[in-house]
Image (cartoon, helix red, strand yellow):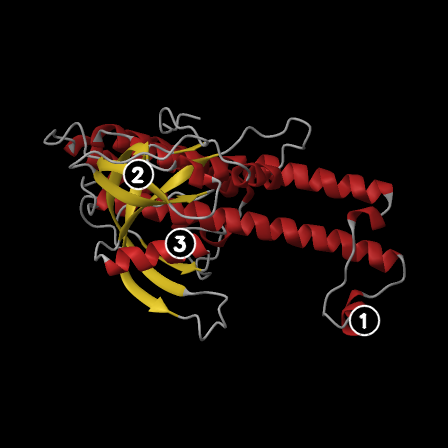
Amino acid sequence: DQVHWVQGFDPDGPDEEAAEGEMVLPVFPLQHAVHIPGTVHTLNIFEPRYCEMYSNIILNGSRRFVVTLVQPQPQNPDKPDTLGNKLKSLKSSPKSIAEVGVVFYVEEFNKVDEETEGVIKYVCKHRVIGRVKIHKILNPRYLQDRNTYLRAVVEDFKDDDEGADCMDEEVKLSNTFRKVVELHDKLGSTETVRFSAQMTMGGNLGIRGEQGTFWQTASLWQVLVQERLGAFQTARVVAEQQMVQDFLQEQGLDLEELLQQSDSGRVGIRLTDLPGNLQDRYLKLQDEFAEESKPFVALLIWFFQSLLQEPTHGRRLEMLDNVMTKEVLRLQAKASMQEVLGIVGNNEDDDE
């Protein structure tokens, strides 16, 4: 974990005032998501403190707030090392927040409380317009206390190597990305989540700047990893459901009939309802999926946060190229194996 957290953060510390001339922005900490400059996001707002925040930034015209990552508490060693428990640890009593975050700018602000009967108050569309460094949280106790939102002293986060010539690294990244797309096309449907061969690949894919092509390329990679994790989780659910369905059939029960008889359209089966050997298989399946999903989670949270906080364009190019190069090597090995086995992929399936 190489993430830089806000130094000296005390979740029980007193409120402070900003000095004259310091930039102060609201903070919206997220538990397990990292956002990238240039991307667009829609949020449903219902929590009272964030309804207050949106009302304030719309009223004062700033329309801006900081989104940053929450530092989780260490996972309980007595709990299984599963993905579910890791995500729960992110949600429980956070220790601090990441020092570098991004700025969300509200492009569209819609009040929807009447349509949703008060369940959701605002639906807002945002664009990520830049990065900031958080120097100090002015009201740290509100990371856990939900009475109001956090406020922080921040400054724009600029590269230390502005003006440096990184053309060689940019070209290298562009070429590596194109190799990935070509290999995805070659492997076809045997690579379930992949980039489309029709993706526009012209030009330099590594140009610096908050609106530059580097962040667009990083965003494409982030979406690829998100889709792979989603497909992985879907496969886990299907495998678990199949295990339970097989058990029901062994007991002479039909799942479809049970669903039809249920008023809620669901059949409640607890893990403890299953025989011991099946409980063991179920838990083993969860552990296997959790272990295999670790690289996805590491990329989506820690790697992309490391990209955000990196102060040099050249190093960011190197970091992303290293990740893509690993994908190239994996795909090349898979393609070679398929050639040996005579496996041909279908290129007509849906792509990224």
The residue carrying pointer 2 sits among few (fewer than 14), some (14 to 19) or many (20 or more) residues within 10 Å by Cα, namely many
Residue at the spot 73% in from the left edge and 40% down from the top edge: 283
Residue at the spot 49% in from the left edge and 48% down from the top edge: 228
In the figure, 332 relative to 108: above or below?
A: above
Using the image, tell me which numbered label, if any, was put on residue 26: none
Q: Is residue 145 visible?
A: yes
Q: Earlier in the sequence, mark 1 or mark 2?
A: 2
In the figure, 120 relative to 64: above or below?
A: below
Q: Which residue is mark 1?
A: 257
Q: CA distance from mark 1 to mark 2?
A: 56 Å
Q: Earlier in the sequence, mark 1 or mark 3?
A: 3
> Disc 1 on helix, strand or loop?
helix
The residue carrying pointer 1 sits among few (fewer than 14), some (14 to 19) or many (20 or more) residues within 10 Å by Cα, namely few
Q: Is residue 217 left or right of residue 77?
A: left
Q: Earlier in the sequence, mark 2 or mark 3?
A: 3
Residue at the spot 35% in from the left edge and 32% down from the top edge: 306
Using the image, tell me which numbered label, if any, was put on residue 152: 2
Q: Is residue 321 visible?
A: no
Which amino acid is tagged 3? Tyr
Q: CA distance from mark 2 to mark 3?
A: 15 Å
**Number of residue marks:** 3
Which quadrant is home to the N terminus? top left
Residue 13 in the image, given as x and y percentages of width and height: 41, 30
Q: Which residue is mark 3?
A: 50
In the figure, 259 relative to 281: above or below?
A: below
> Disc 2 on helix, strand or loop?
strand
- Farthest residue toward the left? 163
Find out whether the residues at labels 2 and 3 contact each other: C-beta distance under 8 Å. no
Q: Is residue 156 left or right of residue 328?
A: left
Residue 204 in the image, given as x and y percentages of width and height: 18, 43
